[in-house]
Image (cartoon, rainbow, N blue to C red):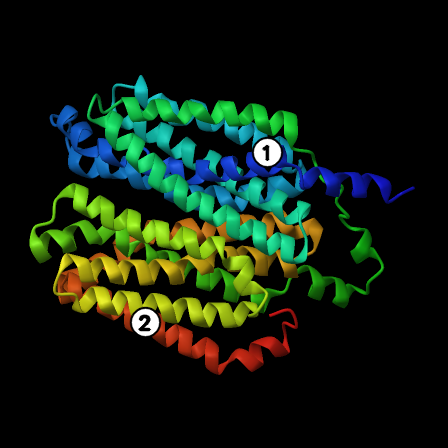
């Protein structure tokens, strides 16, 4: 009789409404930045008389990433303390308010405050929804669904960039209205999702103190996963941050051509994420890291030596295929080694490193670009990706020795 609620929950988690709600909620994390990107030129023109407006307008796009990174640490604690669903409800409600605030606010300072709060809400959403997925699904089902989650996030980026660009031509404020769509998803969260029955401390109480510490905190593997996440996102964000300038220098490409190129990389990434479950059946976590980084390295090397737009596009597609395997792989890997009681804070930490890498990307890449040029920056990053891939290949046996599931 004790197992019946769990069995009922398993049946519920396989229902279409729950799966659709989880996937749609995941797209909100991408919407946080992509939606208003096309509005930036018109926004800068509107605030042209404001001191340092060029910098401040760019911060409107990037500051959420910093606050997602900060908020991920707290969201990880909260999701384990107050529960997955309560955090998700509060964060989604706040998301609509903070995201849509730019439609009515009339100063860059207050818009930036709204964007910072938006970042905190995204941290809660991403940590909450990913933790729920890890709770609802096990084994291959978890791998398949996290691959589907990453694919939806990528496709969401393509959709929101397109819609945001279209309505930004009408008025730079209109894309901020898209954030209110989160409240429609909020209804689905309230109605369809359930708080899982978690075994919090019961498993650990039967273990010796040393065993409890070892089970609760696999620090070596945790640090390795976080390090990959930081490196991956720093490298990946060279595409949206530097590619438009690179294409402009290469053959004077238009903004729409740059957008198409970025969308191609995002689409390729989504396709790879969609096939993650298929790949995971055949390869372990470390092997996927090796292959994903090596494929991304080939893509960046192609971009670095490309003589034309079409060859750059080919390189972007190759890189996207590699990068698309990494995000679901890290989520599934982390979920598989962390006990239920600590899963939320561990995934919150992963959210922090993902978005801190996004925030760091222009800071790290710009000095290299200034010294080497844009083409060599992509080539340099391709070499770095290949070196890290090679290191993981060489150390794969040692990694597996202290991580049997790797």
Q: Percent from the top left, x then y, of residue 12?
A: 71, 37
Q: Percent from the top left, x then y, of residue 230?
A: 41, 59
Pick the front one: 254 or 121: 254
What secondary structure is marked by label 2?
helix
> Which label is found at residue 28?
none
Q: Residue at coordinates 36% horizontally, 76% vertically from top-left?
A: 387
Does residue 54 lie above or below 322 as drawn?
above
Quarter placement of the C terminus:
bottom right
Which image quadrant is residue 384 in? bottom left
Q: Residue at coordinates 20% horizontally, 57% vertically from top-left?
A: 366
For the residues labelled 1 and 2, the Cα–Cα distance comes to 38 Å
Which image quadrant is residue 314 in? bottom left
Does residue 164 lie above or below 330 as drawn?
above
> Is 12 placed left or right of 349 in the picture?
right
> Which label is found at residue 384?
2
Looking at the image, is mark 1 or mark 2 earlier in the sequence? 1
Pick the front one: 377 or 20: 20
Residue that mark 1 sits on: 87
């Amino acid at each position: 009789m004790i197992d019946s609620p769990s069995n009922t929950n398993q049946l519920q988690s396989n229902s279409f409404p729950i799966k659709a709600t989880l996937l749609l909620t995941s797209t909100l994390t991408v919407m946080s930045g992509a939606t208003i990107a096309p509005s930036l030129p018109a926004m800068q023109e509107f605030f042209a008389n404001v001191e340092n407006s060029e910098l401040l307008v760019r911060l409107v796009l990037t500051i959420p990433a910093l606050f997602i990174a900060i908020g991920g640490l707290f969201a990880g604690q909260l999701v384990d303390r107050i529960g997955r669903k309560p955090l998700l409800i509060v964060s989604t409600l706040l998301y609509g308010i903070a995201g849509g605030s730019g439609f009515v606010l009339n100063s860059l300072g207050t818009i930036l405050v709204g964007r910072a709060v938006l970042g905190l809400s995204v941290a809660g959403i991403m940590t909450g929804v990913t933790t729920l997925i890890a709770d609802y699904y096990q084994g291959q089902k978890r791998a398949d669904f996290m691959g589907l989650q990453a694919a939806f996030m990528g496709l969401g980026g393509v959709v929101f960039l397109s819609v945001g660009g279209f309505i930004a031509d009408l008025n730079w404020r209109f894309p901020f209205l898209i954030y209110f769509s989160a409240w429609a998803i909020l209804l689905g969260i309230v109605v369809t999702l359930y708080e899982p029955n978690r075994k919090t401390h019961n498993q650990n109480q039967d273990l010796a103190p040393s065993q409890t510490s070892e089970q609760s905190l696999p620090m070596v593997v945790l640090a390795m996963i976080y390090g990959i996440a930081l490196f991956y996102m720093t490298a990946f964000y060279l595409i949206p941050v530097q590619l438009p300038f690179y294409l402009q220098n290469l053959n004077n490409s238009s903004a729409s051509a740059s957008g198409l190129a970025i969308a191609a990389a995002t689409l390729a990434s989504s396709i790879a994420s969609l096939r993650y479950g298929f790949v995971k059946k055949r390869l372990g976590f470390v092997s996927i890291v090796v292959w994903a980084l090596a494929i991304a390295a080939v893509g960046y090397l192609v971009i670095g030596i490309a003589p034309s737009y079409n060859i750059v596009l080919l390189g972007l597609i190759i890189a996207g295929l590699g990068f698309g395997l990494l995000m679901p792989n890290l989520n599934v890997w982390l979920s598989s080694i962390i006990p239920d009681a600590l899963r939320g804070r561990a995934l919150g930490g992963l959210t922090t490193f993902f978005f801190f890498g996004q925030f760091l990307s222009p800071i790290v890449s710009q000095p290299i670009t200034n010294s080497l040029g844009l083409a060599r920056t992509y080539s340099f990053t391709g070499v770095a990706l290949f070196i890290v891939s090679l290191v993981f290949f060489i150390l794969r046996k040692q990694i597996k020795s202290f991580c049997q599931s790797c």
